[in-house]
Amino acid sequence: MSYSNGTLHASVVGEYNDNLPLANVTIVGVAGEVSGVAVNCGQGRGQAHAGYGAWERNETSEIQSRYENGVVYLTGLESATQGGVWSSDLEINLS
């Protein structure tokens, strides 16, 4: 797993997949407020702006973000990771 230039990237190695979605992510060391979040995990994609947003397919997104003292808290990632977070690489872009 790595984080640089506003992007968190986790690469999947191996064939194990428990088919469970990821609900929350906490990223420490972020320089400032986050105005948008884009999540890509295999077939699941989601976007949020200023704490909430809409799916690329115009469905409601539950992704929310909160910034506090250099820490970004992301919640509601279940829709974007519905095929299982370890089914493919995970990428979260903060803007």
Image (tube, grey):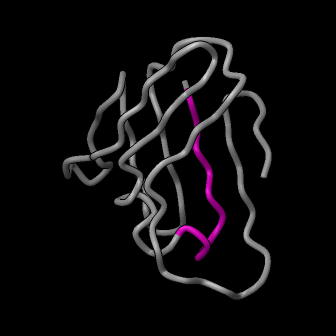
Check if residue 86 falls in the magenta segment: yes
In the image, residue 71 sits, relative to residue 74, either above or below, namely: above
| Nearer to the camera, 44 or 3 | 3
In the image, residue 9 sits, relative to residue 48, either above or below, namely: below
Q: How many marks?
A: 0
In the image, residue 27 sits, relative to residue 31, either above or below, namely: below
Q: Residue at x 41, y 43 (%)?
A: 75
| Quadrant in which residue 85 is drawn | bottom right
Percent x, y of residue 51: 35, 27
In the image, residue 58 sits, relative to residue 94, either above or below, namely: below
Percent x, y of residue 55: 30, 48
Q: Quadrant of the C terminus?
A: top right
Residue at the extreme bottom? 15
| Nearer to the camera, 3 or 18 | 18
Percent x, y of residue 53: 29, 35
**Does 19 sit left or right of 93 as displayed?**
left
**Does 78 sit left or right of 88 as displayed?**
left
Q: Residue at x 36, y 35 (%)?
A: 64
Q: Residue at x 64, y 17 (%)?
A: 70
| Quadrant in which residue 15 is drawn | bottom right
**Does 6 sit left or right of 50 as displayed?**
right
Q: Residue at x 35, y 42 (%)?
A: 63
Check if residue 87 falls in the magenta segment: yes
| Nearer to the camera, 40 or 1 | 1
Give the residues in magenta.
85-94
